[in-house]
Image: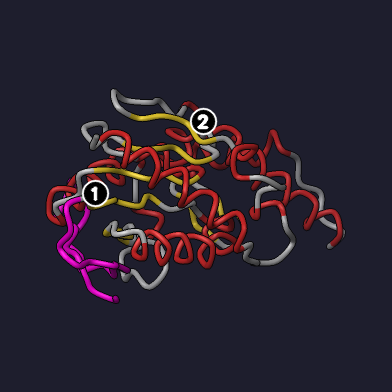
Amino acid sequence: MIFTWNSPARQGTLPTEELLVAFDRGRKVRLLVCPAWFDEANKLRRFTVEVMRRLDAAGIDSLLPDLPGCNESLAPLEHQTLEGWRADMATAAEALGANHVLAIRAGALVAPEGLPGWHYAAQSGPKLLRGMIRARTIAAREAGLAETSEKLMDTGRNEGLVLGGWQIGSAMFRALELAEPALASGQSDIAQSAVGGPGLWLRAEPDEDAGQAERLTALIAENIAKSNL
């Protein structure tokens, strides 16, 4: 279940070996999972793996690669770029033989365009930044510090910024200001309303919801079954 994959060297970065969570039995349908990012990654990790367990039971392989700079990665997060992460996901998809994709929240910003699949509750780069900036200003106010969104945005663009404990580099920050998820051919949206209940990323602490995991899995499995008719 725990494996590794290799992220190649790119401009300004070294090659790295990253962790991979996989339910891989060599089956026909192989689903690349592009996870949520930053604080939402923590809140949705259990949910993501529970969906993968259910996909496994439904006869679908699923492959969840860590991006450089995330989780147990030894690569510095501040050196990562949005373009680099997109290339990394495309590399992982090819190396792992993925033929479908499930992108969760901001993971939709790096979903390989050549794979059919789904964007679940896709999040844009500007919304991602706004939420993290808001959290930082609230924490600063509670600590008696004076920070404004405008000043933090300027710092992020020019120097990079620590948000929620994540050191986001200036190149990544500027790219996220403009990044919008876009559905490629063969990809479709799955709204949170189709899964039922509030999104788990809205909860104060990481949590799980078996019903939501089952409904998301069912939507994916049903769509795959229809496409194979």
Q: Position of residue 194 (x, y in %)?
A: 60, 38
Q: Which quadrant would residue 65 be assigned to in this image?
A: bottom left
Q: Residue furthest bottom?
A: 2
Horizontal side of 147 relative to 22 (left or right) equals: right
Residue type, label 1: Asp
Q: Nearer the viewer, residue 129 or 59?
A: 59
User: Image height check: is 32 above or below 6?
Assistant: above
Helix, strand or loop at mark 2? helix
| Left or right placement of residue 9 versus residue 81 in this view | left
Q: Nearer the viewer, residue 6 or 104?
A: 104
- Seen in the picture, residue 74 relative to 89 is either above or below; the reply is below
Q: Amino acid at mark 2?
A: Glu
* Residue 55 vs residue 160, the one in the foreground: 55
Q: Position of residue 29 (x, y in %)?
A: 22, 50
- Name the residue nearer the viewer: 211 or 108: 211
Dot 2 or dot 1, earlier in sequence: 1
> Where is residue 120 shown, x and y percent of the image?
49, 41
Residue extending farthest to the front is 229
Question: Which contiguous range is marked in magenta?
Answer: 1-28
- Where does label 2 land, which residue? 177
- The mark lying in front, picked from 2 and 1, is 1
Instruction: Quadrant for the C terminus, please.
Output: top left
Disc 1: which residue? 88
Q: Which quarter of the rendered picture does the N terminus lie within?
A: bottom left
Classed neighbour count for the residue bearing mark 1: other residues with Cα under 10 Å, few (<14), some (14–19), many (≥20): many
Q: Secondary structure at mark 1?
A: helix
Marks 2/1 in contact by CB < 8 Å: the verdict is no
Q: CA distance from mark 2 to mark 1?
A: 20 Å
Task: Please tell me which residue is depicted at 42% across the width and 68% down the height of the picture.
Answer: 71
Residue 70: quadrant of the picture = bottom left
Residue at 31% x, 64% y is: 75
